[in-house]
Amino acid sequence: MTLQLWTNCRAATMASGAAQPYGLIDDAALVTDGETLAWVGVRGEVPESLARRCTVHHDAGGALITPGLIDCHTHLVYGGDRAAEFELRLNGATYEELARAGGGIASTVRATRAASTDELLTVSARRLQRLMNEGVTTVEIKSGYGLALAHERKCLQVARSLGQNRAVEVRTTFLGAHALPPEFAGRADDYVDTVLDMLALLHAEGLVDAVDGFCEHIAFSTTQIRRVFDAARQAGLPVKLHAEQLSDSGGAQMAASYGALSCDHLEWLSEEGARAMARVGTVAVLLPGAFYFLRETKLPPFDWLRKHGVPMAIATDCNPGSSPGTSLLLMLNMACTLFRLTPEEALAGVTRHAATALGLPDRGTLAAGQRADFVLWDVQRPAELAYAMGSNPRIQTVFKGKAEGAST
Ligand code: NIG
Ligand code: FE
């Protein structure tokens, strides 16, 4: 394996428990060994035995280096858009009213079913590219706009192919329990039977890394989601949940009882829910884009999350209805301005804690043994990544040890 040395940089290692904020190392050096980081530390302290074996030396030009960003919650494979609903909402209709009237998720289901694999691939690749342009090296993509076997399969296959031949890893999540498709109107429990059948087949086809559900009065009850989670557990798949977005339905406690990787949204989370998540290490995935776009006013209970030590991740929630955006850097800004997270908490939310939310302990920090996924930024301080709205200071991404082209 080729060892490569990176110097002339500051590194925000984001290592847990580091003495400096952001785990910052001012005059840093990184050594990669193939796809892995072999050493990270102060430049003057690179072990001589390692330095001698480095065959390539990169001058980072004074860049700040962070771990590759991780977008741990997206729905980026979908057909159509919901700009018309955006207009209706601006004329007074609410998200829930539109959903109940057959719009909302159901309208994206119609467009997604009508789209061919190639069409979905084209539009989704564009969205993914925008995330990658901002330094994303791992992205989670959910199904959930097909809601029938052939279409859920199509979306997961598109997600899988997006992860091939690109400098990004895609993790797929089966979200069959996202909404009730029209052909099952009034028969939610029958649809859950179908979800279980789809899960078994799609998992057998190697298309599923995790299982999610939407637990809400406009979607599925905790009892219904339990059936899905029981099947996931039997299949050995981790679970996560869209929980307490519009109301407190006790979804977080229920998901925590399954050792869920994450509970996401959480505006209406109770303190008991936060305690239950803390007990099993479930990550709170906060989605400021959806909060902003739906003009929510109820903030997730950060004080309880901090008090009970629940790790907080940040993600785009990229989807056509509640968060039609592909900027994880903007989410950092919104996490700070709308949710009052510190820039350090926000950056940890798209690195270390986002990795935990995906069950991927091999990434999210810069440390020996971690995957060599990192980003060079044209900034002095890590806080600038959250501060500068709409700018993209990425210089270069390194994915699995391999340096990719400069920023577009
Ligand atoms: O995460 N909450 C459920 N699902 C998506 C929204 C989906 C949609 O409106 O199309 C979300 O916000
Ligand atoms: Fe979502």
Image (cartoon, rainbow, N blue to C red):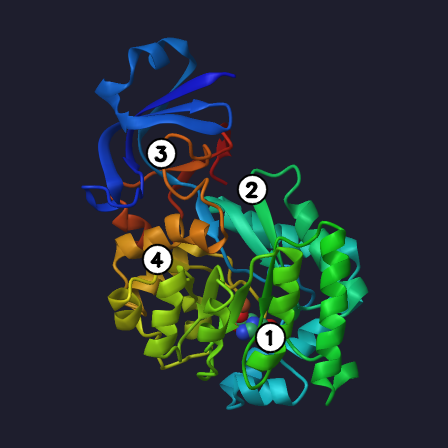
What's the distance in space between the residues labelled 3 and 4, CA to CA?
29 Å
What's the distance in space between the residues labelled 4 and 1, CA to CA?
38 Å
Label 1 CB sits under 8 Å from any ligand 1 atom = no
Mark 4 crowd level (few <14, some 14–19, many ≥20, 10 Å Cα): some
Q: In the rendered image, which residue does mark 2 sit on?
A: 168
Q: Which mark is residue 367?
A: 3
Q: Quadrant of residue 276?
A: bottom left
Q: Nearer the viewer, mark 4 or mark 1?
A: 1
Q: Which amino acid type is shown beneath numbered disc 3?
A: Ala
Q: In the rendered image, which residue does mark 4 sit on?
A: 389
Residue nearest the viewer, comparing 82 with 97: 97
Picture residue at 74% right of the left edge, 61% below the top: 200
Q: Secondary structure at mark 3?
A: loop
Q: Which amino acid type is shown beneath numbered disc 2?
A: Val
Mark 2 crowd level (few <14, some 14–19, many ≥20, 10 Å Cα): many
Label 2 CB sits under 8 Å from any ligand 2 atom = no
Count every numbered label the image shows and give the total: 4
Q: Earlier in the sequence, mark 3 or mark 1?
A: 1
Whether residue 157 is visible, yes or no, is yes
Identify whether 137 is placed above or below 188.
Answer: above
Look at the numbered discs 2 and 1 and tell me whether their residues touch, using CB distance below 8 Å.
no
Q: Which amino acid type is shown beneath numbered disc 4?
A: Met
Q: Secondary structure at mark 2?
A: loop
Give ligand 2's quarter of the image.
bottom right
Q: In the rendered image, which residue does mark 1 sit on?
A: 225
Q: Earlier in the sequence, mark 2 or mark 3?
A: 2
Q: Quadrant of residue 111?
A: bottom right
